[in-house]
Amino acid sequence: MPARQPTVFLPHGGGPCFFMTWNPPDTWTRMGDWLRTLPGQLPEPPRALLVISAHWEAAEVTVQTHPNPPLIYDYNGFPPHTYALTWPAPGAPALAAKVQSRLQAAGIPCRADARRGFDHGVFIPLKLAFPAADIPTVQLSLKAGLDPATHLAMGAALQDLRDDGVLIMGSGMSDHNMARLMAGGTEVDAPSAAFGRWLQSAVTAPAADRWQRLLRWSDAPHARDAHPREEHLLPLHVAVGAAGTAAGRIAFEATVLGSRQSGFIFGQ
């Protein structure tokens, strides 16, 4: 029997940031180093990965069924070599079918997409975490409209997959104010710090309270400063829903370009 996997919310950085020169040069070092340590924080190597990325929204929840997903270089203006990065992980059509079945059984319509590849919210962080690219991987979309309750329910419908050795990961950023990030400060911005403290408190609260706080995330201090649009936060909601009653912990924290960035693990 495989060990039950936790769920994870990971910050995926800015574009292909871990694979290029940055100024200052250590801007993304701590985040990249943490991503590399992620497998060591798991009970055993996952049998498969299910990733919800901030960079795929669909009118109806959609699961990727491509057996050998290509890469989608969905970033602009970066050095040419970043458009030649590889991460040839196999797809997992059988897992995708289970995802679709469980979501539909929970009353969440879900369609399949046999052409979709991995966007950079998947292949950039996982090229660090799982560089061998040998674990079958499936990507699942966010649902347009970005309703918090829907994304918590999506996770809840999928939580039993963890018992099959599936690692469910939300890939986003705990603060995604692009104006702040582009300004490139070296000290954490006060609004980002305030939202970061709230988010860490919410994630580490008992499960019922955690769910309720995340339903009302936009009422948090400086919520819309941290997330003018919430697509980079809602992968966390899926990870929380899939965690069930498992405790959440702060697994990573750093100041990056004036923002507080966090990663969380539930159930480990």
Image (cartoon, rainbow, N blue to C red):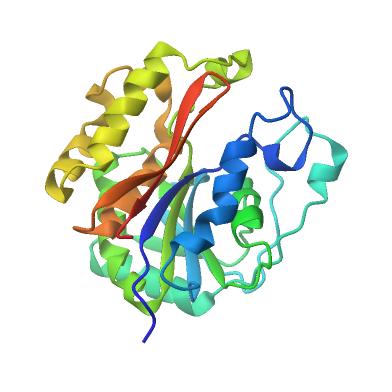
Q: Say if 174 sits above or below 249 in the image.
A: above
- Please provide percent x and percent y for residue 257: 58, 21
Q: Which residue is drawn at 42% across and 71% down?
A: 166
Q: Which residue is drawn at 48% across and 57% down?
A: 51
Which residue extends farthest right?
80
- In the foreground, 165 or 201: 201
Which residue extends farthest left?
208
- Please provide percent x and percent y for residue 50: 47, 63
Task: Decide if residue 115 is in sight here.
Answer: yes
- In the foreground, 62 or 163: 163
Q: Quadrant of residue 199?
A: top left
Q: Say if 184 sits above or below 69 in the image.
A: above
- The mark tally for this picture is 0
Task: Decide if residue 121 is in sight here.
Answer: no
Left or right: residue 87 compared with residue 121: right
Q: In which quarter of the image is residue 26?
A: top right
Q: Quadrant of the N terminus?
A: bottom left
